[in-house]
Image (tube, rainbow, N blue to C red):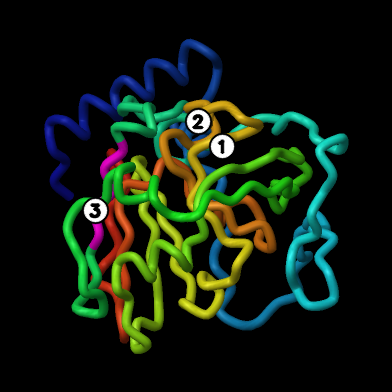
């Protein structure tokens, strides 16, 4: 069996390390090997995770909370940027969101804050709850309804699905019936202040009757389609 020079050097280094700590080569490799469970080749029993309760109304909508119930959001999650907000312009007055209507809208291109500003302003106090116990918080969101944005873009009745992409390339997809719910917002204010970077500045999707992971932070692109979307964007360093 032929062994490459690089592999030989690696084996030699491994052997020396093993000798220095009293382990054989095989024991050292076993230590280094990732502990991964093999995929079963048949159905097996599994333990589902425990998820948090959103406390939704019987019709599936999110309850409104009084201002006195507000509490800060405990933590934040950024999936593809080492849990830190990406380095972008966080000023909502400078936001730029690419609109790809997939030929289901009469307007396309780049949406700016000047396009959102004339729309009716909405304020709601909703629970933001991750599927896990945290992050969690009851906060006041200020923004516009997505249904008003869709109307402003001239979305046609055959626009069936929407995709929202964040600045870290995290994305979610929802059907338009869900997105046109009057509680779904595009928000740029949190508790009467511009949304902080860790919570999704400059513009965040808010879907209060879904777990928080569905409320995409720092939106950079909105796509609509009648049928299906192209391959999703790749996260950084993927």
Q: Which mark is residue 83?
A: 2
Asked whether the viewer can see residue 209, the reply is: yes
User: Answer yes or no: do the residues labelled 2 and 1 have beta carbons within 8 Å?
Assistant: yes
Residue 189 position by quadrant = top right
Task: Give the crowd class for mark 3: few <14, some 14-19, many >=20 residues within 10 Å.
Answer: some
Which stretch is magenta?
A: 95-99
Q: Which mark is residue 144?
A: none
- Mark with earlier residue (3, 1): 1
- Mark with earlier residue (3, 2): 2
Residue drawn 73% across the image and 49% down it: 126
Apparent side of residue 66 relative to residue 119 in the rendered image (left or right)? right
Residue behind mark 1? 77
Give SS at disc 3: strand
Q: Main secondary structure of the magenta part?
A: strand
User: Answer yes or no: do the residues labelled 3 and 1 have beta carbons within 8 Å?
Assistant: no
Which quadrant, please, contains the C terminus?
Answer: top left
Residue behind mark 3? 98
Residue 215: x %, y % from top left: 55, 52
Instruction: Determine whether 67 is above or below 109 in the image.
Output: above
Give SS at disc 2: loop
């Amino acid at each position: 069996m032929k062994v490459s020079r690089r592999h030989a050097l690696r084996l030699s280094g491994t052997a020396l390390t093993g000798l220095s700590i009293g382990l054989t080569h095989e024991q050292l490799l076993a230590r280094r090997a990732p502990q991964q469970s093999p995929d079963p080749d048949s159905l097996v029993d599994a333990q589902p995770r425990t998820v948090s309760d959103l406390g939704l109304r019987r019709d599936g909508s999110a309850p409104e909370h009084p201002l006195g119930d507000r509490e800060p959001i405990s933590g934040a999650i950024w999936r593809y940027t080492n849990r830190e907000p990406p380095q972008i312009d966080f000023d909502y007055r400078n936001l730029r969101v690419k609109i790809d209507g997939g030929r289901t809208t009469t307007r396309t291109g780049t949406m700016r804050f000047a396009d959102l500003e004339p729309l009716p302003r909405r304020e709601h106090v909703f629970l933001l709850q991750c599927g896990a116990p945290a992050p969690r918080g009851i906060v006041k969101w200020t923004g516009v309804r997505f249904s008003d944005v869709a109307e402003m873009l001239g979305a046609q009745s055959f626009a069936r699905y929407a995709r929202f992409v964040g600045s870290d390339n995290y994305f979610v997809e929802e059907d338009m019936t869900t997105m046109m719910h009057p509680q779904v917002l595009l928000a740029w204010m949190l508790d009467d202040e511009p949304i902080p970077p860790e919570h999704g500045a400059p513009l965040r999707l808010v879907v209060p009757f879904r777990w928080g992971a569905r409320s995409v932070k720092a939106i950079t692109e909105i796509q609509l389609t009648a049928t299906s979307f192209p391959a999703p964007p790749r996260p950084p360093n993927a």
